[in-house]
Structures are given as structure tokens and as C-alpha cells.
Amino acid sequence: PMAFNPDLNLAYIPAQEIPQSYARDSRFETQPVGWNTGADFAAGVPPIAPPEVAKFLRSTLKGRLIAWDPIAREARWSVEHDNAWNGGVLSTAGGLVFQGKLNGDFAAYDAATGDKLWSHDLKSGGASGPGTFMIDGEQYVTITTGWGSAFGLSAGFAYDETVPSTVGKVVTFKLGGTGEIADPDFPMIDKTPKGEAFGDEALIAEGAVHYARNCTVCHGPLAVSSGVLPDLRWSAISGHAESFKGVVIDGNLAANGMVSFADHLTPEEVESIRAYVLAQAHAAVPADAGDN
Ligand code: HEC
């Protein structure tokens, strides 16, 4: 949410830039599942993308906190953030503006000038809107933390190096508070492919298209997970055709939110996706080796 300071007549706007390559999907038809935007999510994505792609995407994501003067119709001040999907804004009568960032930095700014007056590491994503309340004359500022959401799922892999913890908390501050936020406990992931690469270039390229259309929005572009769902490259299920088909066609994990694609993909198309996922896994190994 945005916020307003009636004393200063300033509106505080959390802004962001999330560019996306856009190409019309020439074979697009409205489907009962999926995003149905008509955009071709496979456009511009090389069949096997080098790790530099994530780095490049990260460099294109921008965020900003803008103090907007609605009468002068111009920004009074603005603060640049080096990432997108940051939190909503809280404006207080005491002349402070609070905003969390996705990387966990929670800050208070001077409402009139934008000077950063205070900040604290939330040790998880600070992407929600903070609130404030008073008990027995003491004021508290509180924010829910965590990592996920549509952005985390579909674009979060661009955060690979600094991905926030998926464990969410309610974190509350007061003046002179001494509580500590526990360090996140990141699961160790065995980043090795669990199956042999297979299929020729044509099959892998076909798999890339089906993956981009049907799987990207949850499992991440280029089969690189954002840390919310299992990374298909390192999943034992990807190494085994029957198990993979069992999940994707037969809906074996439907109760956990992984729906069946039986109405949208043939078993051959699903096998092409598996070829693509394993190709991505093997392509990533030299770069990620020893980097667990
Ligand atoms: C709407 C979101 C969504 C989409 C789209 C989606 N998945 Fe999933 N997928 C999930 C969730 C949630 C899980 C985790 C289920 C669990 O915790 O057991 C999952 C798990 C999986 C697993 C099991 C991985 C493991 O190691 O446990 C496989 C394999 C898989 N998905 C393949 C695919 C493929 C292939 C596609 C595209 C055809 C796809 N998924 C599209 C949500 C999605």
C-alpha cells in the first residue's frame, strides 16, 4: 500500500520496474489453466541459458520509494532500491516513513527529506505493509516477513545469491527493544542432477517451449527454482520418467498444489520437458560445482 502525510501533503509510493520480454504467442488459445496473457514466455530464452542470464535479469529489477507532491505533481524526494517487490509504506504522525525491502532491510526515513534514519535486518523478505499501534503509551511498529508470492515463484531465481528465507515471521519493534530475530535455517540442497541427460537438440528445444508455457510461473524461468518450490533440476523425480509422469500427468502431488496437466500435455510433451529440465541441470553443474 501507499501512504499519505497530511502535514507535509506528501504521498509515499512504493514503485518498481520489472521488465519482461514480450512476444505474442502465435499459437495462443485461452486455456482453463495458466496465465492466459497471450505472451510467449519462451520468447528470447535460449534452450540452454548460461548462469549469466540470472545475473542480467537481476540487474534489470528496480525498486523506488517516491515522496510525491500531488499539488506540485512532482516527486519531492525518492530513494532507489536495487531490487523489486519491496514492501508497502507506513507514514506516521511523528514524521517517519517505514518501508521493508525484499532483501530484509527494514528502514525508517525522514518524511520530509527521505534521509534514512534507522534500519534493521529482518532476516527474511520484508515485502508486506508495516503497521503501527500503541499499548499503554508505548508505540510499536510491526511487519510480517517471508518469501514467496507470484514474484518469488516466477522471477525469484534472479535473487539466487540473496534469496530470503521462506520462513515467515511477525516482527515487532519498539524504541529501546532488545529482542533478537533468529537466523534463518536454510535447507542444504544437493545440487547435482539425479538422472542422465537425454534427447537431441530438437526435443530439448520443444521441452523448453512447453516448460515456459506451463511451468515457468511456478517453478521459475530456465527451470531455476526461486527457493519456494522444489528445484526440478535437482529433484530425484526428474531423473525417473515414470515418477515424473506420475506427478505431471497423473497428479500424484495434486493434494500439495501440483495439479495434473493431463488435459494440456501429452506424455510425449511431458517427456520433452523432462529432457529440458535435465539438460538445464547438467548445464548448470560446472558453474555451480562446489557451491552448495
Ligand atoms: C500453479 C503452480 C505450479 C505449476 C504451474 C507447476 N507446478 Fe510443479 N509443483 C507445484 C508445487 C506446489 C509443487 C510441490 C508439491 C509438494 O510439495 O509436494 C510442485 C512439484 C513438482 C514436482 C515434484 C518435485 C519434487 O522433487 O518433489 C515436479 C516433478 C513438478 N512439480 C513438475 C512440474 C512441471 C513439469 C510443470 C509444468 C508442466 C509444473 N510442475 C507446473 C506447483 C506447480
Image (spheres, rainbow, N blue to C red):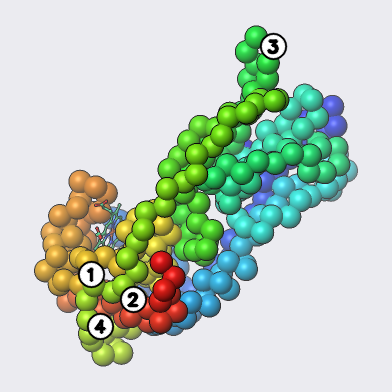
Q: Which mark is residue 137?
A: 3
In this image, 178 relative to 292: left or right?
right
Vertical position of residue 62 compared to residue 28: above or below:
above
Q: What is the CA distance from the residue labelled 2 to the residue labelled 4?
A: 8 Å
| Residue behind mark 2 | 281
Q: Nearer the viewer, residue 39 or 121?
A: 121
Q: Earlier in the sequence, mark 4 or mark 3?
A: 3
Q: Secondary structure at mark 2?
A: helix
Query: How far apart in space, not on screen, are marks 2 and 1 (Cα)?
Result: 10 Å
- The crowd level at tag 2 (other Cα within 10 Å; few <14, some 14-19, many 20+) is many
Q: CA distance from mark 3 to mark 2?
A: 56 Å
Furthest residue toward top = 136
Q: Which mark is residue 197?
A: 4
Crowd class of label 4 (few under 14; some 14 to 19; many from 20; radius 10 Å): some
Q: Amino acid at mark 4?
A: Ala
Is ligand 1 within 8 Å of the beta carbon of the residue shown at mark 1?
Answer: yes
Q: Residue, x 67% and y 46% (percent of image)?
A: 14
Q: Amino acid at mark 2?
A: Ala
Q: Amino acid at mark 1?
A: Ser
Image x and y of residue 77, in percent? 83, 47
Which residue is pictured at 32% across the width and 65% down the height?
190
Disc 2 and disc 4 in contact, CB within 8 angstroms: yes
